[in-house]
Image: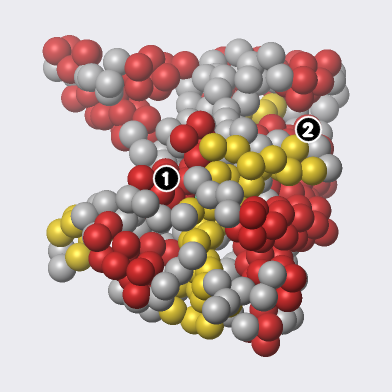
């Protein structure tokens, strides 16, 4: 009897997911004679037993498609919103794995997905994962698919902002994705020649940023481009974050000051939607130059994957099928140079690949006089 393999995609979507589904699926079907079903919308669809047969017709023509044909969600098996409450639905998921007589489950996703997959592995399921995220923050892999496409889109945005910034002698702040890791802003900032790059790993001093912009202005460059990760924070906010967001100064009683502190705390907590707007205003005040904000948002995740992501996703997908055939489970298929390496899920979960402060990309950017606000 043919072996039966399940596939799901989970977490935020990324260009290259369909290329990976195709790579895994085609190799499992054609090379190893297995059957493949997809679960819709990540772990939620697996819990609700919503499936889709992935035969060769379903896998055909999807290589260049953005998003995921399976749909995705951020639901976790052990804390899933059901009837208005967070419930542990692990048993139902395990039951559905057995119901379909699965021999393995392939999970495509970022850090959260690796954690969820590891949880299911501990319940006795044969689990194998692939690293996907535009943030490029999954550990133990050189790179994750989705990053290259997002990098291209973000770089094009920096390029395009140059001409309008130059024409109007403005400061243009570009907010890019990357809540906890700055790979995207760093890569696009270097590739696009941003004058300032702000990333979560290096809390910035707004006065240093303003000084760098003024130096440019005095040397005849009346415009500046600031590439900022959505999770980049000021030094003051970083201190508040370290203190757990305590409002130490509320004793002052000064209403306005309190309100400002409150706003700063809100920017520290969660995804900080106001940070880039706040920075653009501060820079305008400190430099006297007009400033504008652009938030690139979901454009970075949408649309057709780059050639690099299609290649990576296909390589990792087919390698995954090879490992499934060998019966090697409890691993993530990591990219290593031109090849791949199965790495233990245990070593991947609960970690994040942030930008090391002594990373070559940072050294390189500093060498071409990019300011990091430190
Ligand atoms: O995890 C990738 C990512 O694109 C982050 O860069 C961003 O912070 C987040 O997803 C946005 O997620 P959502 O789709 O839930 O808004």
Residue 166 - label:
none
Q: Quadrant of residue 125?
A: bottom left
Question: Is any atom of residue 134 visible in this view?
Answer: no
**Residue topped by disc 2:** 190
* Front in this rendered view, residue 284 or 272: 272
Residue at 53% x, 60% y is: 106
Give SS at disc 1.
helix
51 left or right, relative to 196: left
Q: Nearer the viewer, residue 208 or 60?
A: 60
Check mark 1 vs ligand 1: CB closer than 8 Å? yes or no. no
Q: Residue at (53%, 49%) from the top-left corner?
A: 329
> For the residue with label 2, is its CB less than 8 Å from the closest atom of ligand 1?
no
Farthest bottom residue in view: 57
Quadrant (top left/top right/bottom left/bottom right) for the N terminus: bottom right
The answer to whether 208 is drawn above or below residue 98 in the figure is above
Residue bearing mark 1: 118
Count residues near mark 1 (Cα–Cα under 10 Å), then give few for <14, some for 14-19, many for 20+: many
Q: Residue at x 48, y 26 (%)?
A: 233
Front in this rendered view, residue 310 or 268:
310
Residue 288 location (% of width, % of height) = 61, 26
The image position of residue 260, as x and y in percent, is 30, 27
Counting from the top left corner in percent of width and height, residue 231 is at 49, 35
Residue 254 drawn above or below residue 3:
above
N-term mark: 1 or 2: 1
Q: Secondary structure at mark 2?
A: helix
Residue 319 % position (x, y): 71, 54
Labels in figure, total: 2
């Amino acid at each position: 009897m043919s072996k039966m393999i399940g596939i799901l995609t989970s977490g935020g979507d990324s260009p290259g997911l369909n290329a990976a589904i195709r790579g895994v699926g085609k190799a499992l079907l054609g090379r190893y004679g297995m059957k493949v079903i997809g679960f819709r919308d990540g772990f939620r669809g697996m819990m609700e037993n919503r499936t889709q047969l992935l035969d060769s017709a379903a896998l055909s023509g999807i290589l260049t498609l953005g998003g995921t044909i399976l749909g995705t969600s951020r639901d976790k098996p052990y804390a899933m919103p059901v009837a208005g409450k967070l419930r542990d639905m692990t048993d139902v998921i395990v039951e559905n794995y057995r119901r379909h007589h699965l021999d393995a489950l392939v999970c495509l996703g970022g850090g959260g997905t690796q954690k969820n997959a590891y949880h299911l592995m501990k319940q006795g399921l044969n689990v194998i994962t692939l690293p996907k995220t535009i943030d490029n923050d999954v550990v133990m892999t050189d790179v994750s698919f989705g990053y290259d496409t997002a990098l291209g889109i973000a770089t094009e945005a920096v390029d395009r902002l140059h001409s309008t910034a130059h024409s109007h002698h403005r400061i243009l702040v570009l907010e890019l994705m990357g809540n906890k890791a700055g790979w995207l802003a760093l890569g696009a900032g270097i590739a696009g020649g941003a004058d300032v790059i702000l990333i979560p790993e290096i809390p910035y001093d707004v006065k240093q940023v303003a000084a760098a912009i003024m130096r440019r202005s005095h040397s005849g460059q009346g415009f500046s481009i600031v590439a900022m990760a959505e999770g980049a924070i000021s030094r003051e906010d970083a201190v508040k974050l370290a203190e757990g967001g305590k409002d130490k100064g509320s004793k002052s009683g000064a209403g306005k000051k309190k309100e400002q502190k409150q706003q700063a705390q809100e920017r520290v907590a969660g995804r900080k939607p106001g940070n880039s707007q706040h920075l653009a205003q501060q820079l305008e005040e400190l430099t006297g130059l007009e400033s504008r904000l652009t938030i690139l948002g979901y454009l970075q995740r949408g649309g057709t994957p780059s050639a690099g992501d299609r290649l990576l996703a296909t390589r990792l997908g087919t390698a995954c099928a090879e490992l499934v055939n060998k019966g090697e489970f409890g691993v993530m298929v990591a990219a290593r140079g031109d090849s791949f390496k199965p790495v233990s899920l245990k070593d991947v979960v609960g970690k994040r690949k942030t930008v090391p402060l002594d990373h070559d990309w940072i050294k390189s950017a500093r060498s071409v006089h990019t300011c990091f606000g430190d």
